[in-house]
Image (spheres, helix red, strand yellow):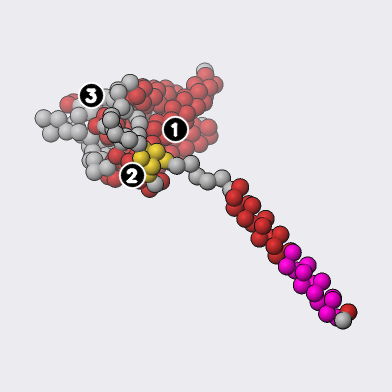
Amino acid sequence: MKFGLKNLTKALSIALALSWTAGSAMARTAQAPQPAPIIQPGAPGEPSREITAEQSLELGRSRYIPADARFMQHMIVHHAQAVDMGALIDTRSNHDGIRLLGRRISLSQTAEISMMQTWLRRRGESTDMPVDHTGHHSSHGAGHSMMVEPAQPSTIPVMPGMLSPAQMVELAAAQGTDFDRLFLTGMIAHHQGALDMVNRLLQQPGAGEDPELSEFLGEINADQSTEISRMNTMLADLG
């Protein structure tokens, strides 16, 4: 009898423990936050509808205007010149801070060029600059970028902040402190030009609403503003 009572007590304890565990799991499940529904507003006179995360991402990819694509095409060329400028540093500068800054700019802007090209391809857009009636790219500054096809400098205006072909030649010919000063001055203007391009885009109705593009614009503003401040300090230290 005692043996049976012990077994019964043990069985009841196990059953209670299992019941408590199951109840706790159900309570946690009930308390777990559910993802908020994604609502797509309807057209005028039409109701809104709930969509999946995948549908939301696809809609985001298509929510861009021609000015957004042109911005990306132009910024690819703009970034490419910054990469070209950074490639000159190792053989012309002995300034450790400038060497480190140049590597950072080259790596980050090369990665961003790849991102912009992917963004354009996913939307069926060309990764090249628009071509004018002369057959040349409508704008290009360096005329000899490693990342894009060379163009004829005499027929092509410079985008905001980009060095002219003559300025690129002058930079490539400089050494030591002269190079450092020209590089910093040129790259400060180059970064400021990128910020101006972002501001110009955002002034256009409907521009910059694509989620991926919007995030990229924010990164340009944050990163290049920070680097401008750093370069101004370096330039002041050169005297």
In the rendered image, residue 195, in percent from the top left (x then y), is placed at 39, 24
Is 172 within the magenta? no
Residue at 67%, 57% in the rendered image: 23
N-term mark: 1 or 3? 3
Residue at 13%, 34% in the rendered image: 135
Amino acid type of the residue that numbered disc 2 sits on in the rendered structure = Glu
Q: Is residue 167 above or below residue 110?
A: above
The range drawn in magenta is: 3-16
The label shown at residue 3 is: none
In the rendered image, residue 20, in percent from the top left (x then y), is placed at 71, 59
Amino acid type of the residue that numbered disc 3 sits on in the rendered structure = Pro
State left or right for residue 185 relative to residue 75: right
Disc 2 target residue: 58
Dot 3, crowdedness within 10 Å: few (<14), some or many (≥20)? some
Query: Foreground residue, 49 or 120?
Result: 49
Query: Foreground residue, 30 or 79?
Result: 30
Q: For the residues carrying marks 2 and 1, which lies nearer the camera in this image?
A: 2
Q: For the residues carrying marks 2 and 3, which lies nearer the camera in this image?
A: 2
Disc 3 target residue: 157
In the rendered image, residue 125, in percent from the top left (x then y), is placed at 24, 40
Amino acid type of the residue that numbered disc 1 sits on in the rendered structure = Glu
Query: To which quarter of the image does residue 138 belong?
Result: top left
Q: Quadrant of the N terminus?
A: bottom right
Q: Is residue 92 visible?
A: no
Disc 1 target residue: 219
